[in-house]
Image: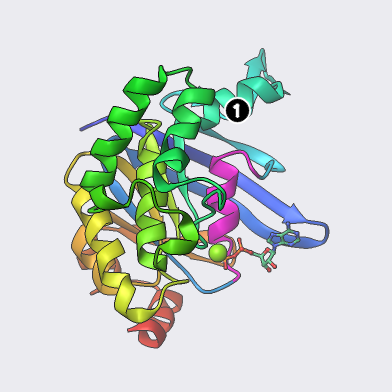
Amino acid sequence: MSGVMVDVRGVHKGFGPLKVLRGVDLQVRTGEVTVILGPSGSGKSTLLRAINHLEKVNRGWISIDGELIGYRRSGDKLYELREKDILRQRTHIGFVFQNFNLFPHLTALENIVEAPISALRRPRKAAVVAAERLLERVGLADKAGAYPRQLSGGQQQRVAIARALALEPKVLLFDEPTSALDPELVGEVLDVIKDLTRTGTTMIIVTHEVSFAREVADTVVFLDGGVVVEQGPPASVLDAPQHERTRAFLSKVL
Ligand code: ADP
Ligand code: MG
């Protein structure tokens, strides 16, 4: 059995009186693909953002590849890391957003090389060669010089995926990567993600695309009311769910 890459233990997160995550436990093994399903407002984005330390949790902890995210432990106390150490940790965590979040004033190629050069101090030449290879991998070799506004939503999202891969992350997080796309553009983005699942990259994908989940997931997690209600291989969670809440959700999205 491979090791655990992402370990989420007893995580609670609220915003004022609103309790969003109420004790989430989740382990993602190295090289595995986990798909998170759940109703709108169930805390899926909050969980992904917590993994990236974009949200500070109120209780519990998260580690990636054995390293505590956002904190260091001293005895039985946790101390928050300094900003520069948090930024270093984030370079190991790729994040693909619903709305692409490309830099509008940079070309596709410049979007991809920016972080490797500024955060990882890669020589520009090597970063450009790697970026060209990544653009090829997402089927956009001819769009290196295009600005985001000159690209379709599907193409922008494929650039965003290439940009996330450029940091050679330990884990890649996707937050509803196709829900901002016109229906005819969803397939090209799912195909690129599907392709990546064959490369052994550890991934957590939040999506409502149930048939995609069935195809690519090693583990499907159903999140509802701020807890993991049910998890397991797609054949059990999607085709033989044990919990009424999972069944009710699936009957709505299928
Ligand atoms: P999901 O991604 O599953 O739709 P979210 O994690 O985005 O759910 O949100 C869960 C709940 O937390 C929602 O009710 C949302 O309004 C609330 N929420 C998320 N972020 C914040 C925030 N920064 N401040 C206040 N409430 C928030
Ligand atoms: Mg969300």
Mark 1 CB near ligand 1 (8 Å cut): no
Residue 42 among those drawn in magenta: yes
Q: Nearer the viewer, residue 219 or 55?
A: 55
Query: Does residue 79 appear in the picture of this structure?
Result: yes
Which residue does the image show at 36% across and 65% down from the upper left? 154
Residue 76 among those drawn in magenta: no
Which residue does the image show at 39% across and 41% down from the upper left? 109
Residue linked to disc 1: 87
Q: Residue furthest top?
A: 75
Residue 7 located left or right of residue 24: left
Q: Name the spot of residue 207 as percent of width and height, x first.
A: 40, 66
Which quadrant would the N terminus be assigned to in this image?
Answer: top left
Q: Name the spot of residue 241 as percent of width and height, x first.
A: 31, 72
Which residue does the image show at 34% across and 55% down from the upper left? 158
Q: Name the spot of residue 46 as percent of width and height, x first.
A: 60, 55
Q: How many marks?
A: 1
Q: Nearer the viewer, residue 174 or 59?
A: 174
Q: Residue furthest bottom?
A: 252
Which quadrant would the C terminus be assigned to in this image?
Answer: bottom left
Crowding near pointer 1: few (<14 within 10 Å), some, many (20+)? some
Which residue does the image show at 34% across and 30% down from the upper left? 128
Q: Residue furthest left?
A: 198
Query: Does residue 241 appear in the picture of this structure?
Result: no
Instruction: Write down the region rendered in magenta.
Output: 41-54
Where ligand 2 lies, by image quadrant? Answer: bottom right
> As displayed, is residue 117 above or below residue 75?
below
Q: Nearer the viewer, residue 122 or 4?
A: 122
Dot 1 amino acid type? Leu
> As displayed, is residue 135 above or below residue 129?
below
